[in-house]
Amino acid sequence: MRSDLSNDAMNRRFVPFRLLLLLTLACLWLVPASAQQVVERIAAVVNDDVISTSDIEARLRLDLMASGLQPSAQNQQRLLPGVLRNLINEKLQLQEAERYNVQVSDGDIDQAVGNIAGQNGMSVDRMTQMLAQNGIPLATLQERMRSEIAWTRLTQRRFAPTISIGAEEVEEVVARYQANQGLPEHLVAEIFLAVDDPQDEREMRQFADQLAAQIRQGVTFASVARQFSQSAGAANGGDIGWVVEGRLDPALDAALAGMRPGEVSSPVRSPAGYHVLLLRERRRVAVASPDEAVVTLKRLALAIPPGTGRARTEQILATAQRASATLRGCDALAERASELGVANLLEAGRGPLREMPAPIRDVISGLDDGEPSRPVRLPDGVVVFMLCDRELAASGLPSAEQIQQALTAERLNLLRRRYLRDLRNAAFIDVRV
């Protein structure tokens, strides 16, 4: 029997359901696994598909484990509405993918699960064991992967061919970057929770508050973003890249302006929903940061083995000091290393200055090309670094291809959200206890 519910009616039914569902699941956690079949109940019907209370329980456990949130009663209560909403969305996504004959094979699922295990530094067997220890069937993760893959393939097939980013749009972005040269820009990650229905306002605000509080208590931002964020960058830990000041919604810009690198914001309301922001770094548009330079180093390393006498130690230190004071250029350093029989220790590597170990970075950051560092005393010797080459970072302006890719991803994400919203509005969703 199908009896379509209006959105208002459906939302009204969610309110008592949240309380009853919490009590139902609380009872389930107290019942041995062998006896849970007796109390299995239908939690919701989405068109012709059923979501059971055990589906919700397993998904709640998975979300808590994956995000690092503590399985407290408060966290469970806050997460339950979002877990139910996500399960309903995934049913709709799978139904729509089936309607368009989008296939997801068992091999696709196995590969996705294997990728998750690898990202967490464990085998699939070990991850399966951990899931079981937390009362989570592997099928819960597999079903989530199935809906994610199917939805991505479906929306790519339907919308990607329709998205055309013209040269004028790219040129407009380039011109905006050029006009903003020297202005502050922020490297930002976000957790975005959409508010598509005004009746969800309070619930989503409370959920955003909870996530921000948990992150401040030590839960990693990236894990929470991957699990709960609805933004396009969720799979990448919420990263949305470098954003020029003034390009975001004014409320988000104002929040970022008052933040320090590494700081997490309180929830910020935009017209689309709530954002929890992480400011990773700050720099200026099209102004190269010295830390972004790629440097080539050589070194004169002189060993001071354990047990070396004081006189010999002072002699070695004096040799290093003379090299630092008199040598100029990497060729001269190479000649001196050859004379001292330490040429095999000459190469020190090439890479971004910001990725160098802090003690080395501090020593070489102020050097000119061909200038040696002061002698650096190590536990087993002394070393003089030589900055052979410094390749300044690019201006920071993205390429036309990067801009086109970003605009395409932004438009595709918007179309996906609208598509899912329309599916929900048209669906028969019967929430029960």
Image: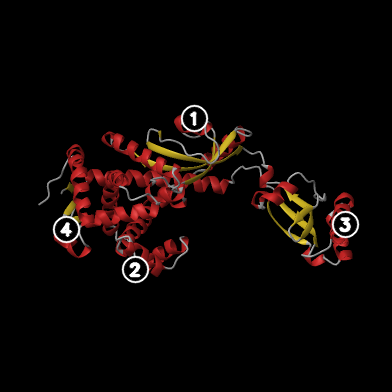
Report, in whole angstroms, how far the alpha carbon at label 1 lies from the one at label 3. 55 Å
Amino acid type indicated by mark 1: Ala
Amino acid type indicated by mark 2: Asp
Q: At numbered mark 3, what does the secondary structure look like: helix, strand or loop?
A: helix
Report, in whole angstroms, how far the alpha carbon at label 4 lies from the one at label 2. 27 Å
Side (left or right) of 138 relative to 16: right
Label 1 sits on residue = 254
- Image marks 1 and 3: residues in contact by CB distance under 8 Å: no
Point out the tag, 3 or 2, that comes first from the N-terminus.
2
Label 3 sits on residue = 319
Display colour scheme = secondary structure
Q: Disc 1 vs disc 3: which is toward the camera? A: 3
Label 2 sits on residue = 106
Point out the tag, 4 or 2, that comes first from the N-terminus.
4
Q: Residues within 10 Å of mark 2 (few under 14, many from 20)?
A: few
- For the question of whether residue 294 can be seen, the reply is no
Side (left or right) of 59 relative to 354: left
Which x, y percent locates residue 420? 31, 47
Which x, y percent locates residue 121? 47, 63
Which x, y percent locates residue 356? 67, 52
Q: Disc 3 vs disc 4: which is toward the camera? A: 3
| Figure quadrant of residue 16 | top left
User: Residue 40 shows which numbered tag?
Assistant: 4
Please tell me which residue lies in front, 134 or 163. Answer: 134
Amino acid type indicated by mark 3: Thr
| Figure quadrant of residue 284 | top right
Q: Residues within 10 Å of mark 3 (few under 14, many from 20)?
A: some
Report, in whole angstroms, how far the alpha carbon at label 1 lies from the one at label 4. 48 Å
Q: Residues within 10 Å of mark 4 (few under 14, many from 20)?
A: some
Report, in whole angstroms, how far the alpha carbon at label 3 lies from the one at label 4. 79 Å
Point out the tag, 3 or 4, that comes first from the N-terminus.
4
